[in-house]
Amino acid sequence: MGIFDKVLPSLAKADERLAAQMTDAVTKRDYSHLGELAAVSEKVRAAITEIERLEPPAAESPPAPAKPRRAAARKVKLEAPKKRRRSLPKRGYPKYSRRGDSLVRTDWSSSKNVEQTHAVPYATVAQIATTIVSEGGAMFRKDILTNLSTPEGSTLPIHQVYLVLGWLLTSKAIRKKGRGDYVPDYTKLTADALRGSFGQLSETPSK
């Protein structure tokens, strides 16, 4: 904004009023002050001319482009490639069954979207139960089961230990208390009771 932007409109209005007064005086044939009005009007016009010389009127800016319609103005959002939705584990897992003389655990793999099975020989189930009975006491930690040996002399895999503990929890032969602590029900850990619980499992066809 120029320094004369507010002055110029006022001078233009004053010039219009002077011209109107001179026209009115001529109409009424009152020439007593016509010369004075003309002199003042001439000075006002000279001031306007000088201001316009010092600050030429700015070129008209091109009209702003019409706003596009709302539908056209919306930006198209690029859809991100949809990630493959993994299926959630279905209810009822894990499931325990028997295949011959082996305990079978069936889980649902959400990443592969298939069932997965793991099995341990019943001899391993009996070995873990016997260790609980002999070393468990009123409450035991799973640590007493981490150094058991297989008949071949190697360390019993930890996943087999967890498989058997999971089934013993399901059959209520033990119950969990705290982190890593279990309370045994010795009436369900006898050889006969354990074999009876195992025999009640549904039979899984051999692969």
Image (cartoon, rainbow, N blue to C red):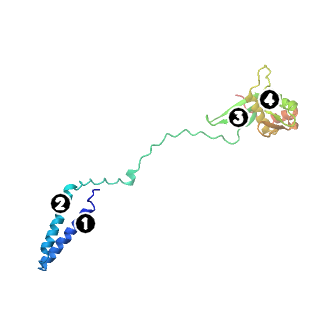
Q: Quadrant of the N terminus?
A: bottom left
Distance from Cα at disc 4 to Cα at disc 2: 106 Å
Q: Residue 138: x, y in percent? A: 87, 37
| Disc 2 residue type (three-letter) | Thr
Q: Is residue 105 left or right of residue 183?
A: left
Tell me which label, 4 or 1, sits earlier in the chain: 1
Q: Is residue 79 left or right of residue 128?
A: left
Cα–Cα span, label 3 and label 1: 93 Å
Which residue position is annotated with label 1? Answer: 10
Mark 4, mark 2: which one is toward the viewer? 2
Q: Which residue is mark 4?
A: 145
Q: What is the spatial separation of the Cα atoms under label 4 and label 3, in whole angstroms?
A: 22 Å
Q: Are marks 3 and 1 in contact (CB under 8 Å)?
A: no
Say above or below: 83 vs 154. below
First-in-chain label (4 vs 2): 2
Q: Which mark is nearer the camera, 3 or 2?
A: 2
- The structure residue drawn at horizontal position 19% and vertical position 62%, both measured from the top left corner, is 47
Give the residue number, with chain letter if any, for mark 3: 106
